[in-house]
Image (spheres, grey):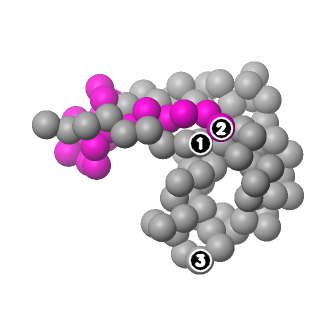
């Protein structure tokens, strides 16, 4: 039985709307965080680059947040395929100020 974990995410514009997975430092190279862009590209980005990007507005990131929540939430295809436990993505835009 899987458990629903929370995972903090913030959104930037750089150059596409990009999700920054705030709790991913342990799973990334030193000085990086995992990211997922609105053009379906994922990877890592350096903290310096993330800090330079403008913070996205809710209108900018709403569609990407809904798509990621659907993919990685409890009924999404990632959970159905046996990926890690499903997650609830919690938006924390203020955390960008503390990176």
Chain-order first, disc 1 or disc 3: 1
Asked if residue 3 can be seen in this view, the reply is: yes
x%, y% of residue 61? 69, 30
Read off the residue under disc 3: 30
Quadrant, the N terminus: top left
Q: Quick one: label 3 or label 2, which is nearer the N terminus?
A: 3
Q: In which quarter of the image is the C terminus?
A: bottom right
Q: Is 70 left, or right, of 16 in this rendering?
A: left
Within 10 Å of the Cα at label 1, are there few (<14), some (14-19), or many (20+) other Cα atoms? Answer: many
Q: Which span is picked out in magenta?
A: 74-92
Q: Where is residue 6 in the image (x, y as percent from the top left)?
A: 44, 38
**Mark 1 and mark 2 in contact (Cβ < 8 Å)?**
yes
Q: Which residue is drawn at 72% across and 65% down?
A: 47
Quadrant in which residue 65 is drawn: top right
Q: Residue 9 carries which label?
A: 1
Percent from the top left, x then y, of residue 82? 20, 45
Q: Nearer the viewer, residue 68 or 7?
A: 7
Q: Is mark 2 on a helix, strand or loop?
A: loop
């Amino acid at each position: 039985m899987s458990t629903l974990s929370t995972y903090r995410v913030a959104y930037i514009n750089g150059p596409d709307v990009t999700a920054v997975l705030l709790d991913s430092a342990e799973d990334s190279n030193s000085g990086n965080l995992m990211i997922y862009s609105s053009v379906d590209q994922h990877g890592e980005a350096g903290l310096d680059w993330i800090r330079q990007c403008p913070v996205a507005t809710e209108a900018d990131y709403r569609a990407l947040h809904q798509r990621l929540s659907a993919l990685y939430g409890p009924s999404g295809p990632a959970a159905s395929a046996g990926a890690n436990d499903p997650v609830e993505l919690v938006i924390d835009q203020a955390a960008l100020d503390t990176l």
